Amino acid sequence: QLVRAGKVLYVGSSNFAAWHIVKANSAARERNLMGIVSEQSIYHLNNRMLELEVIPACRHYGLGLIPWSPLDGGLLGGALEKYNTGRRTGEDFVKQVEKNRDKLEK
């Protein structure tokens, strides 16, 4: 309704599985609508699960992919050198650094 009213030009999705993308675009096609044009999902060197199904689905339907948290919440952005001050000193972040230390040191 918002698309037909001109209030929304394009629709995207976030954290959809490949089957969600297929279902959404099939439903849009049945209603003579454009369908989703982009997918935003978590994607970084420590989590590449999108490559199995979501990226092929995006390619098939011509969707743009918007990576969410490409630096894994800061872990891939030099976290080992600079987690002494600010919000990065929180217990949860320090646990994540220690859990992934072997990957981060490569």
Image (cartoon, rainbow, N blue to C red):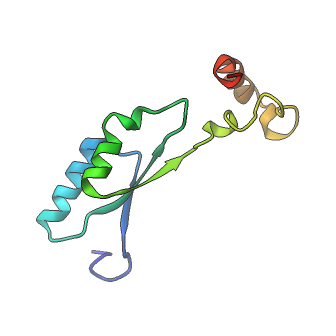
| Quarter of the rendering containing residue 44 | top right
Q: Position of residue 78 (x, y in %)?
A: 75, 35
- In the displayed structure, does residue 57 sit left or right of residue 88? left
Outermost residue toward the left in this view: 30
Quarter of the image with the C terminus in it: top right
**105 to 59, vertically: above or below:** above
Residue 83, horizontal then vertical, whole percent? 82, 32
Nearest the eye: 47 or 20: 47
Task: Tell me which corner region of the image, top left, top right, bottom left or bottom right, holds residue 61.
Answer: bottom left
Q: Residue at x 22, y 57 (%)?
A: 25
Location of the N terminus by quadrant is bottom left
Number of on-image labels: 0
Relative placement, left or right, of 79 versus 59 is: right
Residue 58 position (above or below residue 4): above
Residue under the image location 28 percent in, 46 percent down: 57
Q: Is residue 70 left or right of residue 38?
A: right
Q: Based on the displayed image, in which of its 4 quarters is residue 75 positioned?
A: top right
Residue occupying image coordinates x 46% and y 33%: 48
x and y percentages locating residue 37 in the rendered image: 34, 62
Q: Residue furthest bottom?
A: 6
> Furthest residue to the right?
85
Residue drawn at x 71%, y 29% as measured from the top left: 93
